Image (cartoon, rainbow, N blue to C red):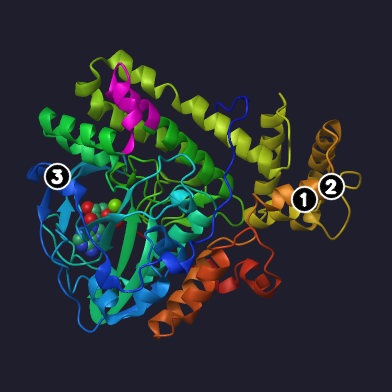
Amino acid sequence: MLFPSLTTQPSCEGIPPLTSPLSTSTHIIDIDTLTFGNDFASLPPAHYTRLQPTPLPSPYLVAVSPHAAALIGIDAAALQSQAAIDLFTGNDIPDDAQPLSAVYSGHQFGVWAGQLGDGRAILLGDVPAAENPAASGDNNINVPHRMELQLKGAGLTPYSRMGDGRAVLRSSIREFLCSEAMAALGIPTTRALCITGSDQMVLRERPETAAVVTRMAPTFVRFGSFEHWFYNQKHDELKTLADYVLARFYPALQQAENPYKALLTEVTIRTARLMAHWQAVGFMHGVMNTDNMSILGLTLDYGPFGFMEAFDPHHICNHTDQQGRYSYARQPQIGEWNCFALGQALLPLIGTVEDVQAALRIYKPAFAEHFMDLMRAKLGLQTAHNDDAALFDHMFNIMQDSHVDFTRFFRKLGELKMTAPGEADSVRDLFLDRTAFDEWALQYAARLQAEASDDAARKLAMDAVNPKYVLRNYLAQTAIEKAEQKDFTEVARLLAVLEKPFDEQPENDHYADLPPDWANDLEVSCSS
Ligand code: AMP
Ligand code: MG
């Protein structure tokens, strides 16, 4: 079994449709009128350090996400101004912003790493969210009233340790594109507003240029933020942080008999559902350390991520992860492990080990239920059936044996005709072992017939959940190489394609192509 302990469960809600950006007429067109608060700064000073970003020389705009801008009521055109470029590079900070970097700790690759913190991210503050934050794709998130704006790569902080406080253009483009691609796929995620760049050189494996990516989320509090206070035995600060998170982001849970247990339960459910989303779209995060796990259940900290291509459940997208701790197949278990780390940290507030364990017990069923729902939707199945787990396992096995491209398989599967599942020029052609496909397809077709499925209606439904376009590494790499030559057009073009991942977009067909041979040599590591 590739996915241990899968059980069939009753279905729950699916992915809501994405709304388009608000009408530009209501949007801020002059960035100077953006007003900042900083709710996080209302926490005691031990939780952060106030500081100013370090300016970068002669910054320029690299990319803007109009959808992300709409979430905070900004017109994308306003981000073209020099004032906006200076603001989002950290070169010119408005008086009402009180920039700070937050402290946190965490487990890295399963080992307690001690204090980490925002080593290169500086929180500018928060701004009012526009009316329809559902466009963020956060289908399981309370409607946020404010969005925090954070500059990643804005210079040294007290938490920089051995780092230089900078982010390179390459990794900034990857984070920017993937944040927005995930949102468009309906997967909870932090957002990316824009990237600014500078010719200042930064040394990684090779010299690269610096950039700043402006990220947005209701909060960037992580599991590691709680672990920090637990391991420092500062239970007052632990409680202050938990109360802050409850009041702002989970107000309904404050009424629970044990609000901290309710918080752990809710975060465990969101994390389990997030893992189900990742597995269902073939997304691999690459560095699922507890300092990269959002307390809101958002995908957070895009580094050496990847989307599954030739299916291999043991695929490791992060070249630095030699043990494969964060391989595709392990993500659901690691998500649970991380919830245990959070549970440990919340133990002094929750009270008893039994209560912590009771909260964590929801993880497996929450994952299984959501994963099964998502898989049924991907296969166009309208009803749940006892044999579904076996059908999916069989499918993953033959995909693995034939190294079938994950995204293309599900998209093409929508074209399958129930009465002729093995016909040529179809999904069958993706398989090296066509007999194996035929065997599976017969079971699948029988299952479809049993629920009186309609080919045309099913294709429509499947196309709405199986993306045609995902951020393949080679697509990101092509945009990065052009951007490093100061041609930013490909970043914008790719963003536009990824904003509509389920649309056919015939003019952009080539963005759905399989990776070219040169992409075999692409290695993505923690270096960013
Ligand atoms: P990450 O692997 O990106 O989640 O980062 C882990 C920790 O290292 C966090 O505390 C980051 O802020 C810090 N970090 C990563 N890169 C840098 C850098 N270039 N300068 C300072 N701190 C960094
Ligand atoms: Mg991180």
Residue closest to the eye, 468 or 171:
468
Whether the residues at callouts 2 and 3 have beta carbons within 8 Å, the answer is no
Q: Is residue 391 above or below residue 38?
A: above
Task: Report helix, strand or loop for mark 3.
Answer: helix
Q: Quadrant of residue 393?
A: top right
| Mark-to-mark CA distance, 2 and 3 | 56 Å
Q: Quadrant of residue 107?
A: top left
Q: Is residue 258 shown in magenta?
A: yes
Q: Farthest residue to the left: give it.
A: 45
Q: Which mark is residue 42?
A: 3
| Mark-to-mark CA distance, 1 and 3 | 51 Å
Q: Residues within 10 Å of mark 1 (few under 14, many from 20)?
A: some
Residue closest to the eye, 26 or 76:
26
Counting from the top left corner in percent of width and height, residue 227 is at: 21, 36
Residue under numbered circle 2: 455
The residue shown at (57%, 36%) is: 371
Q: Amino acid at mark 3?
A: Ser
**Which contiguous range is marked in magenta?**
249-266
Task: Report helix, strand or loop for mark 2.
Answer: helix
Q: Is residue 324 left or right of residue 214?
A: right
Counting from the top left corner in percent of width and height, residue 271 is at: 42, 37
Q: Amino acid at mark 2?
A: Asp
Q: Amino acid at mark 1?
A: Lys
Q: Which mark is residue 459?
A: 1
Ligand 1: image quarter: bottom left
The residue shown at (28%, 39%) is: 248
Q: Nearer the viewer, mark 1 or mark 3?
A: 3
Mark found first going from the N terminus, 2 or 3:
3
Q: Is residue 505 left or right of residue 358?
A: right
Within 8 Å of ligand 2, the CB of disc 1? no
